[in-house]
Image (tube, grey):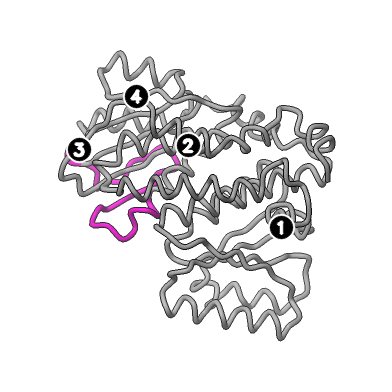
Amino acid sequence: MDLSKLEKYDSKKMYAVYDKWPEIARKSFESKQILVDFDGIKHIIFAGMGGSGAIGDIFASVLSKSNIHVNVIKGYVLPKTVNSDTLVIVTSVSGNTTETLSILKSAQKLNCKIIAFSSGGEMLEYCKENKIMYRKITQYHSPRASFTSYLYTMLKVLHLTLKIKHEDILESIEGLKKINKEINSLNLNDCNPALKLAKWITGIIVIYYPFGLQSASIRFKNSLQENAKIHVFSEDVIEACHNGIVAWERKSNIQPILITGQDDHVKTKERGHIIKEFFQQNKIEYKEIISVNGSILSKIINLVYLLDYSTIYKAVLNGIDPSPVKSIDFIKERVK
């Protein structure tokens, strides 16, 4: 692959936005957004769909070992456990996502603590009319390409509330800068790990993930589906040992990818080794993607960057434009 092929098929230059992810992350975190501190919050709801929903998944993973109870809602209905002590964080890149707007209105009726994030749209107008705390965020290209803009602006605004260490955020941005040199569009050779992964993928993918890194797997699945337009499945590596592993007894064109963390639980690592042994004995080719060292935030962000970029490369290798999502447009036109 060369740059001319990338430019030919990636008509809206999604890759160019991805090349700037570290810079966008830094600018977003250094922005003049006003911080908030909802002190003493024990229950947080992250509400959003698609690329916005992936942000909630990331925060849920980062907070998975905290004392904060976190729900990620991708739909219309809040759980019954929500009350006036719950913080509801709603995110819609467009500001017009019907499901998320429904959650916003429900949270207001329940007198929840609320903060909303979007690039404008109906969400901005509703928050103005109802005096709901709101932060406007810059959209780049598309919701999924705006990932670092949204994540790092939200980290800027919410890190006191979420008790996420300032140094962990800065570490994750430095990690983005480091891997950028390996995977960006100026490095289209066999040393590029994102391009190598894209070339390896030829069929349907099943992703196995450990506790804590589910959000990276979900994001990878979503990006492969939207950018490369291929079917993907995602399974917890421990749960797969009780059901999904049996499916490999039949031959298929499905390819397994294992996401593993440097600090996975000892029993999770054990299961990973057993599954790899199973694949080797049954001559099933697999790929293992290992997280970097560092905080849980750094691990996830690094994985997302590498895996996301591979989906752009996969689309272009298949002669597909990663930007259009006609099937989603079909549904949006019919949803009221």
- Whether pointer 2 and pointer 3 mark residues with C-beta atoms closer than 8 Å, the reply is no
What residue range appears in magenta?
A: 60-85
Percent coordinates x, y for residue 316 in the rendering: 79, 42
How many marks overall? 4
The residue under label 1 is which amino acid type?
A: Leu
Residue drawn at the location 55% of the way across and 77% of the way down: 272
**SS for dot 2:** helix
Disc number lying in front (3 or 4): 4
Disc number lying in front (4 or 1): 4
Q: Nearer the viewer, residue 329 or 155?
A: 155
Residue underneath mark 2: 25
Residue drawn at the location 45% of the way across and 30% of the way down: 27
The answer to whether residue 82 is magenta is yes
- Whether pointer 4 and pointer 2 mark residues with C-beta atoms closer than 8 Å, the reply is no
The residue under label 4 is which amino acid type?
A: Lys
Q: Earlier in the sequence, mark 2 or mark 3?
A: 2
Q: CA distance from mark 1 to mark 3?
A: 42 Å
Percent coordinates x, y for residue 78 in the rendering: 33, 41
Residue drawn at the location 53% of the way across and 39% of the way down: 22
The residue under label 3 is which amino acid type?
A: Phe
Residue underneath mark 3: 38
Q: Earlier in the sequence, mark 3 or mark 4?
A: 4
Q: CA distance from mark 1 to mark 2?
A: 24 Å
**SS for dot 4:** loop
Q: Is residue 272 left or right of residue 257?
A: left
Disc number lying in front (2 or 3): 2
Q: Nearer the viewer, residue 246 or 63?
A: 63
Residue underneath mark 4: 32
The quadrant in which residue 144 appears is top right
